[in-house]
Each structure stands twice: as structure tokens, then as C-alpha cells.
Image (cartoon, grey):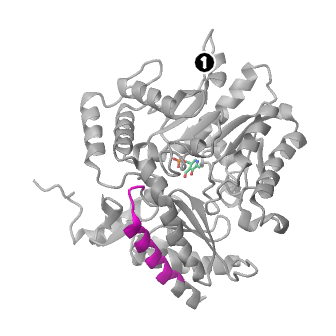
Amino acid sequence: MSTTPQYVTENFSDDLSDRASRHLWMHFTRMSTYHEGTSVPIIVRGEGPYVYDDRGRRYLDGLSGLFTVQMGHGRQELAEAAARQASTLAHFPIWSYANPPAIELAERLAHLAPGDLNRVFFTTAGGEAVESAFKLVKQYFKMMGKPTKHKVISRAIAYHGTTHGALTITGIPAIKQFFEPLVPGGLKVPNTNIYRAPEHLRDDEHAFGKWAADRIEEMILLEGPDTVAAVFVEPVQNSGGCFPPPPGYLKRVREICTKYDVIMVADEVITGFGRIGDWFASHRYDIKPDIITCAKGMTSGYVPMGAMIVSDRLYEPFRSGTNAFLHGFTYGGHPVGSAVALANLDLMEKEKINEHVRANEGALRATLEKLKDLPIVGDVRGAGYFYGIEMVKDKETRETFSADESERLLRGFLSKALFDAGLYCRADDRGEPVIQIAPPLICTQEHFDEIEQILRSVLTQAWSIL
Ligand SMILES: Cc1ncc(COP(=O)(O)O)c(C=O)c1O
């Protein structure tokens, strides 16, 4: 029996694209592109770090799907874990009940998480985990007799999800404007983009880190500590193009949160599960947040799964009496999702993926940094297997592109040209224009070289058409 799905036949290609443009609503997508005749790219299969389209063309998956496919595509171990669990118990809610894979996964995540983060509340996605953390801190402070603590601080251009609560925490005005008014109380502070830092701080990472963290303290004091419930930070911020924390920054954020009784939430939806070479980036940067939100890489994206991992202290008031966290999702703690996550963690351990990332991250950085000889490449930054390449009009002055130029560069040229050249990644202008690179964690030097060569050729062309 053939294992090729029925729709993967040559003659189906145009038909599938046509059907997609008629009925499928792609996320964050200008649908007009597909109504005006451009074919919808249709990905039908994956193997290792590569995916294949319906015409048989191969692409290096330079973004691991959407920062998800840590262990690469086509891993039979994960598919089989899903099939085994679905044929044993496909679904039963964890609303007052439990199932063995969810129990085991909660135990395992508590063990992998730093400090006393021992309580796991499952969700089905990252945004739901962020939404859950937002709601939890509000309920927690109400139960602790501090009902006015409800505001949340997060950073400029950060992405934390799209539901109303999570969108309040997201710091990208362009994706918020249509949905205002959002949940009240979202406050924004600067992120850790040192390339765009005030000029006097650009050459001193420590001073910049202290300056950026102090903006959080300043915001807490301006708003009143009695009104601020939480600070949400990604250990390495994705949106805007990979901003690692300057030395001392996250520890200072931790100190500030402790000082003002503010909950520190590390949003590790991207940085968890090996992306930065450890189970959680919080380990790598040696911090103990009060909550970790995570998703994506937990199952290598094979099934949707997310979680909020909470400290014993935050859980304490829920331990007794009639108190309950009045919140949940039908599919939280899904048996199939949990079973796949467990199989994925097994695979990561067996293949020593954190060690692999740590051993190879320097090579990925060095390979991408070769691109700095191109006139359009202003900055290459990131950590682990997680990089942003910022494009500029003038390297000396760091002048960026106008909105029109950026539109022409990213949407008019780069996204399609990179894909046509065999590299799936993201050209993004939620902040300054960047290319985001986050390959599957199984990648080695040969894949880094392939990424570099494609980027070099396409970015060289981009410069010539500007
Ligand atoms: C840091 C961060 N938080 C939250 C989310 C939202 O996750 P989801 O799309 O699974 O809801 C994302 C998605 O990319 C993210 O990067």
C-alpha cells in the first residue's frame, strides 16, 4: 500500500491551490495575493530539516515550521506515539479527571523547569498559555487581598499571542489597532535591541542591560506597585529579530519583580525545548521566573500542546478550601498531545539535542556572520539555533528602509525569492526589516552552509534591485 497521501499527485497541484484560495483562510495573510493569481504554496511532506511541496520541490525549513519542529520532520517515533495513544485513549478532559500521559508529562515538565516551578497547567497553544498566565496573576492577587494588582508590563514589538488578553501583552501596534480596546492594563517598556539602543549605550552591553531593566522599575513606580501584577519577557525576544538579553538584564528583571511583588513570567513559547540549547532558556540565563509559558517545541509541533508552569508559591492559595482557578480548555492535557510530548522529550534526550545545539551554535553564528560582508546586512544576532539578520540601507549610519522600501524589499521580493531559492524562513518587518532563521535543532554545518549560500545569493540580488 502506498503511504503517499492521495492529494500528492502532479495534476492535483493547480486544483489544490485553487481550492485553497476559495475556501482556506491563511493566518496573518494578505489573501488578495492568492485571489490575484499567485499560486498558494502547498507543503505536502517533510523529512529531517526539509519539506517538499506538491510539485516535488525541496525546501530547507529554516524556521522549523513556526519555531516548532525541533527534532525535524517525518519522525516515526512521534507519529507512532500519537497513533498508540489515540487507539488507547484519544481524548478525555482534565476537568477534574486525569490521564496517564498528562500526569507523566506534568511530572516531567516540573522536573525540567527551574526552581520551584512544579505545577503544570496545560493548554493547546502558546497564546493560551500566555492568556492563562495573565488570568492566573489577576486571580492570585485578588485572592491574596491585593485586588488592584492587575496591570501587565511587556516589551516593545514583543509577540505574545493574538487572543484579547495575550494581544494586550503583545507589543506590536499594527496587529492590535483593529481590536482596540483590548484588555486594560497593558504597559510597554523598551526591549533589548542593542543595535537600536540609545547611542551612548551601544558599546556597553552591561550598561544597556541595566538601562533596559531599569525601565521596568520605572514603569512599576510610575503606575504604582500596587497596580502591577506581572512582567512578561521572552528570554530571547523573537519579534523584531532576535534580541538576546544583555548580561545581567534578566537577573535585574528578577530582582525588580521580587522587590515590588510582581510576578515574573518567562514566555518560553519559542525559547523552550532546546532552541537555546537547554530545556528552558531560563536555565541557560540562570533565572528563576515565577511562571514559564511554553508550547511549540514541546511536541516538535507534531500536535498542538502548550503549558503554563507555575511556582509552588503561586499555586499555594489554590491548594485548599473552595478555591479553584476558574479557567480551562477542552483540549488541555490532551492524551495524544501529552503522549507525543513525552516521546519528543525522550527523543531529545536520546539524541542529546541540547548538547548538540550548544556544540553547534557557535558554528551557526559564525556561518551567518559571514553575511556581514554584504552591504545590506546590518546586524546578525541571536542565540542557540535562533537568529535574526537585520537589513539596513546604510551600514555606517544604521539607516533603515522607509515603509515603502520595506514593503518592496520584503513582500515584493525577499519572501518569494528565498522560497523559490529553496529556503523557507521569514522576512519580517514588525520592527526593522529582518530575516529570521531558526532551523530544526538536528541541523549541522552542511545545513548552515546551505542557508548562508541561499541568503547570500538572494540578499545580493535584493541590494541590486533597491
Ligand atoms: C513568545 C510567544 N508567545 C506566544 C505565542 C503564541 O503562540 P500560539 O501561536 O501557539 O498561540 C508565540 C507565537 O509565536 C510566541 O512566539
- Residue 430 screen position, x and y as percent: 64, 64
Q: Magenta residues?
A: 441-459
Residue 202, compared with residue 74, is above or below; it is: below
Query: Foreground: 153 or 105?
Result: 105
- Residue 345 screen position, x and y as percent: 39, 40
Residue 334, compared with residue 197, is above or below; it is: above
- Residue 5 screen position, x and y as percent: 21, 57
Task: Decide whether the magenta segment is chiefly helix, strand or loop.
Answer: helix
Q: Is residue 411 visible?
A: no
Residue farthest top in this picture:
321
Query: Foreground: 25 or 279?
Result: 279
- On the image, numbered disc 1 is attached to which residue? 324
Question: The residue tagged with tag 1: helix, strand or loop?
Answer: loop
Q: Is residue 176 visible?
A: yes
> Mark 1 belongs to which amino acid?
Ala
In the image, residue 407 lies in the stretch drawn in magenta: no
Residue 401, compared with residue 324, is above or below; it is: below
